[in-house]
Amino acid sequence: PDGTSWQSGDCDRDDADTGVVTQGFAWNGVVYVSAESMVVPTTQHEMLHTNDGSDFPSRVGGILSEGITELLTLQSLRQAGIRMPGATAYPLEVRIASLLAAKLGIDVIKRAYFEDVDVLVKAYLKKVPSTWEELLAATRTRDSGKVRTVLKM
């Protein structure tokens, strides 16, 4: 995020700083996947990130961005007949994205992801009495129960 080009070892340093193990990421239209990744849908997930709307991640926040990306990844792989392991790299994020998809419909989610995030915001505001900011605040807690409450489910 400091504007410099990625160099060998940058991801390892970031992982050490944050206590995670990055399987892959998309940066400026390029997908990077760890050769050691054991997570089956990593490449597909990161490719989807390169195709989301330019302001999608900033408008929906990290939890929904990753959750919706993973939800669409898993759905597309299942539809292609590719067997998936029982685990995902984003279980909580997928649970939260699934709640939103259940409330608004997967077609709204897809249109917002690939075309215009405002489709999602407008659909949300029509169906849910809370504000978009309240939803984002609930997602940041990483508590699916709070998200369910905001979504009135």
Image: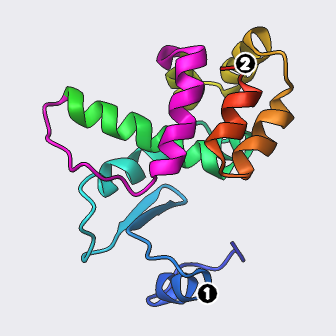
Q: Is residue 52 visible?
A: no
Task: Give the extent of the magenta segment.
Answer: 80-107
Is 93 within the magenta?
yes
Q: Position of residue 148 (x, y in %)?
A: 66, 30
Q: Position of residue 22 (x, y in %)?
A: 44, 72
Number of disc labels: 2
Question: In the drawing, what numbered circle is on residue 9?
Answer: none
Specify whether residue 81 is painted magenta: yes
Name the residue located 81 percent from the left edge and 44 percent from the top edge: 137
Give how far across and how far down residue 105 sits, in percent. Answer: 53, 15
- What residue does disc 2 label? 124
Residue located at (70% from left, 13% from top): 123
Question: Which numbered disc flags the more N-terminal residue, 1 or 2?
Answer: 1
Specify the amino acid type for callout 1. Asp
Q: Nearer the viewer, residue 37 or 43?
A: 37
- Name the image quarter holding residue 149: top right
92 and 14: which one is in front?
A: 92
Q: Is residue 152 left or right of residue 132?
A: left
Q: Residue at x 72, y 77 (%)?
A: 2
Q: Which residue type carries mark 2?
A: Tyr
Mark 1 Cα shell of 10 Å, populated few (<14), some (14-19), many (≥20): few
Q: The N terminus appears in which quarter of the rendering?
A: bottom right
Q: Is residue 15 positioned above or below 134 on the image?
A: below
For the residues labelled 1 and 2, the Cα–Cα distance comes to 36 Å
Q: Vertical placement of 88 versus 5: above or below? A: above
Figure quadrant of residue 77: top left
Residue on which the image places disc 1:
17
Label 1's element? helix
